[in-house]
Amino acid sequence: HGATVRMGTEGAYPPYNFINDAGEVDGFERELGDELCARAELTCEWVTNDWDSIIPNLVSGNYDTIIAGMSITDERKQVIDFTENYTQPDPSAFVAVAGNDVDLAGAVIAAQAATIQASYVAEMGATLLEFATPEESIAAVRNGEADAVLADKAFLAPVVEAEADLAFTGDDVLIGGGVGMGVRQSDTELRDKFTAAIQSMKADGSLNAMIAKWEIGEQF
Amino acid sequence: MTCWDILSDYGLRSLGFGERLLPRDNFTICQQVVLIGSGMIWNIYFGLLALVSGFFLAVATAVGKSHHNPMFRKPAEWFIFVFRGSPLFIQFFFAYFTFQSLKGAYPIFTPLTSAWLGALIVLFLNTAAYSAEIFYGALMSIPKGDIEAADAYGMSGWKRFRRITFPTMLRLAWPAYTNEAIFLFHATTLVFMSGFPARSQMGDALYYASYFADKTFNPFIPYPILAGFFILLTLTVIGTFGLINKQLNRHLPQTNRAKIRLRLNLIR
Amino acid sequence: MAAIFSFCSDPASLEGIEWLSCYLTTGKHLGIYWSIGTVLLLLAITAPVALFFGFAGASAARSRILPIAWFGKGYTAIVRGVPDIAFFLFFVIALDQFFEWIRHEVKCPDWDMPIRQGNDFVVCPEAKLPLGTAPQWVHETYGFSLAVLTFAIVFGAFAANVLSGAMRAVPHAQLETAEAYGMTQRQTFWRVLVPQMWVYALPGLSNLWMVLIKATPLLFLLGVEDIVYWARELGATKTAKFTDYPHGDWRMWYFLALLVFYLGFTKVSEVVLDKIMSRLTRGQATAAGEAQRKAAA
Amino acid sequence: MTLNSPVIEIRNLHKAYGALEVLKGVDISAEAGQVISLIGSSGSGKSTLLRCANLLEDSQKGDILFKGEPVAWKGEGLQRRPADRKQLLRIRTNLSMVFQQFNLWAHMTVLQNVMEAPVTVLGRDKAEVEEKARMYLDKVGIGDKCDVYPAQMSGGQQQRAAIARALCMEPEALLFDEPTSALDPELEQEVVKVIRGLAEEGRTMMIVTHDMRMARDISDHVVFLHQGLIEEEGAPDALFGAPKSERLQQFLSHSLH
Amino acid sequence: MTLNSPVIEIRNLHKAYGALEVLKGVDISAEAGQVISLIGSSGSGKSTLLRCANLLEDSQKGDILFKGEPVAWKGEGLQRRPADRKQLLRIRTNLSMVFQQFNLWAHMTVLQNVMEAPVTVLGRDKAEVEEKARMYLDKVGIGDKCDVYPAQMSGGQQQRAAIARALCMEPEALLFDEPTSALDPELEQEVVKVIRGLAEEGRTMMIVTHDMRMARDISDHVVFLHQGLIEEEGAPDALFGAPKSERLQQFLSHSLH
Ligand SMILES: Nc1ncnc2c1ncn2[C@@H]1O[C@H](COP(=O)(O)OP(=O)(O)OP(=O)(O)O)[C@@H](O)[C@H]1O
Ligand SMILES: Nc1ncnc2c1ncn2[C@@H]1O[C@H](COP(=O)(O)OP(=O)(O)OP(=O)(O)O)[C@@H](O)[C@H]1O
Ligand SMILES: [Mg+2]
Ligand SMILES: [Mg+2]
C-alpha cells in the first residue's frame, strides 16, 4: 500500500460520521472513506477533530483530508479544495413539535452555530437561536425554547423516526452543493486521486448502494 | 463602505441595533474589529456586574467560612466547594436546565433563560465562590497582633471587621483577587460558547470572532483581534486594580519598597 | 466487538442492571475511562511546569536588569490578558507551525517551494511534527505536549502574578535581617523569601489549580479527547439505528457524573492543600497560626 | 456588683500552652486607683497573665472578675471559653492594653491608630476624639508624627504611640506590658508621670516591667511572679527593701545598686 | 588596610528619610576590642546609625570604613548606593546585628534561626554549628526552646534568641540595638557578662542602649546623639560623671539616682 493519509472527521453527525459502541469512527463516511482509500491505494488513519477548528487544522497540515459531511460552498472553496461531491446536494429540513403549525418566517428557529443552516435562518428573517451542538438545537424544540429547528434532513430523519412528538414541517430547503472531501489547495495530487476513486464508485454503482444503506438522500 | 459606515452599522450589532444581517463575504479587517468590539460589550457587561455583585457575596461567604459557628460555616463551605469544584460549563448547563423548568412552571422566570440574566447569575455565583476562597485565605494570614489589639480595645463583630480585618484582608488578597477578576472576564467568553444560546446573532466577542473564523477559515485574524481586545480589557483591569493596590499598601515604607529588589535567581 | 461480559452479545434482549453493565463497558465508554487518565496526567505534568514558569516570571519581574524585568512584567500582563480559549484557537496552531518551520529550515535546506502557499502551510514531509506516517498515538502525544506547553504558558503567567504578590507580602524586616547577616541576594531569596512566600501564595495558587482542573475540556481543540468531550458524546440522544444501546438525551446524567468527578477531585485537592497549608502556618504569628494553636490547645 | 469590690480580680488562674503550664494558680486583685506592678524573669508568664486578664487568652481554671462581676465560662479545661460575648465586650471597652510588641495597626497612620477605638467602639464624636488624640500624642512627645505610618517610626516612637492609643480610650483600667522598654530614661520619667496622673484620676493599672526603679516609684503593690506562681508580693518598700524569698533576693541583687 | 586602623569608622555621615534629616554629619570610630555605647533620646537616630553602619540603609553623604577599607559608592545624594556587592557581603559577614525588633525568621525554629547564617553564609559544618548554636542558646538561657517557632516565645526569649543568632556568627564586630530592652535585670547582667567576654576576645561592638548603668558598666567610649549630631562623647566615667552639655545633663538627670 501507498502513503498514509490522515482522514479528519467530527464523529458527531450520524449517519455521516459518528462514534460507534466500540469507540471507533463509523457511519457512511467511514465506509466510504475506507473504500476510497482502498481504490486509491492509500493507507488511511481516522482522526476526530472539533468542528470549529476542522479547517484550520487541515490547512496547517495536522491531517490531510476532511471527510465530515462538509457541504461544498463557495466560501469554503476559497480556502480549501474539494473533491467531486459524493452525495447529491442534501436538503435541509425544519422539525417542530408534532401538531404545531409553525409560521416559519416569524418563528424562533434553532440551529447549530456556525453552520450553513444558521446563516440561512438569519437571512430568511426568522429569529435565530444558535446552539453549540446539534443535540442542543433539537432539545430546544422539545422543551419549547424554539419553535423549530433547521438541520440536514439526513441528520434529522432518524430523530423524527424515533420520537413521535417531533415532525417535519414546512418545505425542505436546498443549501450548499453536496458533500465532498476537503483537501489542502496545495495537495492537488491527493485531490485528484480521491476524485478518481469517487468517480469509479459512482460508475460502478457502489456509491449509490452505500447511500441507500445509510439513507443519506438522493442517489446519483 | 468606509470604516465609519461599518462602525455605525455594526457598532451596536451585539445589542441588536444596526444592520440585521452580519457581513457574509468580502470580509474586511474593519468589520472584524468592529463586530468583535461590539461583542465586547457583553463581555464587559457580564464581567463587571458579576464582579461587583460577586464581591459582596464573596466577602460575606469568606467571613462565614471563618466563623466558628457551623450554622454559618457549613453553608459557606458547601457553597464554595460546589461552585469552585465544578466547571463553569456544567454550571451553565444545569442552570439553563433549571431555569427552563422554572419557566415552564411560572412564566415570570422567563428572563432567566436569556443570557443577560441567566448567565449573569451563574457568573455571579461562580466568581463569588472563587473570590470567597481567596478572601478566606487572606483572612487566615492576617497578622495576629492586629486582631489582638482590636480585640483588646473591645472592637468586635462588624466594627473590628470593617476597620481592621477587612482592610488587611483586602491588602493580602489583592494580587490573587486581580487574577480572579481577569479569569472572570475570560470566563464570560463561555456564555455563548457552551452555555446559553445566542439569539438573532447577538453574541459576545468570541461569538463574532468564531463567526469570522468560520467564514474566512483563517483563525489568525479574528482571534488575535479578540486577544487584542482582551489584552486591552485586562490591562485596564490590572491598571485599576493596581491603583487600588497602591492605596491598600500605602503604609509600607516607600524607600524600602523600592529598595528590596532581588536579581533573577533561578539557579542556586 | 469483544464485549467484557459474555451476556452482552445481544444487548436488545437485556434489561436493567445487565443492560447497564453492558452499556457502561462498551468500547466508547472505555474511551471516557481512558480519558480520565489523560486528564490526570495532563494536570500532573502541567502544574509543576506552570509553577516553574510562574516562578521564573515572578523572579524576572523583580530583576534589576531592566530588559529581564520588562520581559517578566510583559509576560504576566500580556499572557494573562488573553482568554485561554483564544489561545487554544490560534496560538497552538501558530506554535505548531513555528516548530515545523524551524525543523523545515534545519532539515530541508534545499526545499525550493514557499512555505506559505495561499492559505496552506506546507513544509517538507521530513519536517512535519509528528511525521505524517507516525501512528495515531504519536500524534496524540504531540498534541498533548503542545497542550501542556500552552497550559503552562497561560497558567504560568497567572502563577507569576500570585508569586510576585506573595514575594511582596513577606515582611521587609525578614529580608533585611538576612542581608544584615551577609547573605547574598541569592541566599536571601532562597533561604528566607521563598520559604516565607508560600504562606501568602498558597491561597492564590490553589485557586489557579482549581481553574486549571476545569480547563481540560480545551484539550479537544487540540484533538486530545478528554472527559467532557466523551460525556457530551455519550450523553447525546442515540437512535437505535446507530447503536445497540439507544437512549434519549442523557447529557444530564453524564454531566452529573462529571460533576461528581470534579467535586471528588476538588475534595482530594483541598485535603492535600489544607495539609500543606497547616504545615506552613505551624507556629506562625498569623490568624491561621493562632487558630491552629487554639484548636490544638 | 458590690461597691468596694476590686476592679480587676483574678482567682487561682491556670493557663497552659499545650503541654507547657505557664500559670499554675495565680491570685491578684487591683482596687480602683491602685497601681500593681508585675515583675519576674523573662518567660515567667507576665505577659500571659495580662493577656488572660484581658481575655485574649483562654485560661483553663480559675476565675476572672471585673468590678465584682465574674467572667462567665462555658466548657471545661482546654475547651474553656468565655460564654457571653456581650460581657466580653463590656469588659474590654473598660480595659485598655499596651502590648509588649505594640501591635499598632499597620494600615493606619498614628493619629488614626489612636482615634480608631474611641470612635468606632465608644462611638465618641470624631472631632472631639481627634483633639484628645492629638493631646495624648503631644503628651508622649510624638505630636509631630500624627500622619506617619507605624513602619516609619523608631521603636520608642511606636511604643509611645501605643501608649497614647491606650490612654485615648480613657478606660477604667489599663494593662501595660513593659511600657517603657524602648524608651530612654527621660521619656520613661514622662511615662511615669502620666501613670501617676492616671492613678490620681482613679484609674486602675497593672504594669509589667523590668525596671525595678519604676516599679518601686509608681506602684501600690508589687507582685513577683516565678515559674507560674506568685513567689512573693507586697508593698514596694517592703518587697524591695526586705525581700523574703531567696529567689526574689537573687533576682533583685542584680538591679539594686 | 593599615594595621591599626579602626574596625568600624564612620565619617561625617548624613542620612535623610525623604525630607526628614535624621543624621546630619556623624563621626564615630571603633577600634578592635572596643565597646562603644550610643545613647540618646528616642528618635534621635541611633537605630538609623547602626543600620547605616551595616549598609542596610543608604546614606547620602560621608564615608563608612571597615578595617580601613572605605565603602565604595556610586551615585550621588539620594541616589547614592554601595557600588560593590562583593565588598558589601564581605563587610556584612564580619558584622552581626541584633535588631531592635529582633526580626527572627518566622518560618524557622529558634535553632534553625541561629544556625542559618553560619551554615549558609560562612559555609561552616552543620554539625559543628549546631553544637555551637546550642551552646549559645544555653548561654542566654533558652536552651530548652530550640525547637519552637519565634511566635511561640515571650518577648525576652525572642530577644535572647536574636542575641544568640548574632553571637553564633562569631564576627569581628557586633551591632546591638537595645539588646536588653525586653530583659529583666538578672538576664541583663548575663548579657553584660557575655558582652564583656566578647570584648576580651577582641571583638568590636557598638551598642545602642537606654540603660545608662549598662552603658557605664561595659563601654570604653560613650556617644550621646542628639538631633542627628553627636552632642557629646567620651569615656563613660567622664561623660556620666561630669556631663558638659546642657542637653546631656538634662538627659542624665532622669536616670541618675
Ligand atoms: N522608614 C522610615 N521612614 C521614615 N522615617 C523614619 C523611618 N525610620 C525611622 N524614621 C524616623 O527617623 C528618626 C530616627 O529613627 P531611629 O529609629 O533611628 O530612632 P532611634 O534613635 O533608634 O529611636 P528609638 O530609641 O526610639 O529606637 C525618627 O524620627 C523616625 O521617625
Ligand atoms: N503562643 C505561645 N505558644 C506557646 N508557648 C508560648 C506562647 N506564648 C508564650 N509562650 C511561652 O509561655 C511562657 C510565658 O510567656 P510570657 O510571654 O507570658 O512571658 P513573660 O513573662 O511575658 O516574659 P518576657 O518578660 O520575656 O516578656 C514562655 O515560656 C513562652 O515560651
Ligand atoms: Mg512578656
Ligand atoms: Mg531605635
Image (tube, coloured by chain):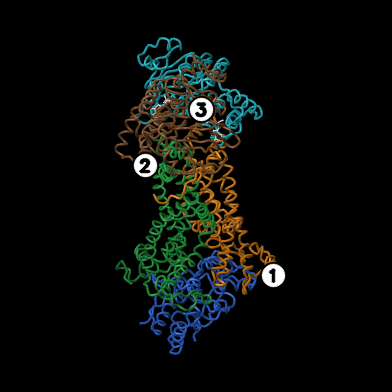
Chain colours: A blue, B orange, C green, D cyan, E brown
| In-front residue for pair A110/C273 | C273
| The quarter of the displayed image where residue D257 is located | top left
Ligand 2: does it lie within 8 Å of the C-beta at label 3? Answer: no
Inspect this view and state whether residue B183 appears.
no
Label 1: how many residues lie within 10 Å, few (<14), some (14-19) or many (20+)?
few
Chain under label 1?
B
Q: Is residue E237 above or below residue C249?
A: above
Amino acid of disc 3: Leu
Q: CA distance from mark 3 to mark 2?
A: 48 Å
Residue under circle 1? Answer: B2
Question: Label 3's element?
Answer: helix
Point out residue C275 in the picture as x, y percentages from the top left corner: 39, 44
Compared to C170, does C1 lie above or below?
A: below
| Location of residue A209 in the rendering, given as x and y in whole percent from the top left corner | 43, 85
| Mark 3 in CB contact with mark 1 (< 8 angstroms) | no
Secondary element under disc 1, as helix, strand or loop, is: loop
Other-residue count near label 3 (Cα within 10 Å), few / some / many at <14 / 14–19 / ≥20: many
Q: Which mark is residue E120?
A: 2
Give the image location of residue D61, x and y in percent.
40, 24
Q: Chain of mark 2?
A: E
What residue is disc 3 on? D88
Q: Can see residue E92?
A: yes
At numbered mark 2, what does the secondary structure look like: helix, strand or loop? helix
**Mark 1–mark 2 contact, CB under 8 Å?**
no
> In the visual, does E197 lie left or right of D189?
left
Q: Are marks 3 and 1 on the same chain?
A: no
* Cα gap from disc 1 to disc 2, whole angstroms: 68 Å
Disc 3/disc 1 C-alpha distance (Å): 73 Å
Q: Residue B3 placed where, x, y %?
A: 68, 68
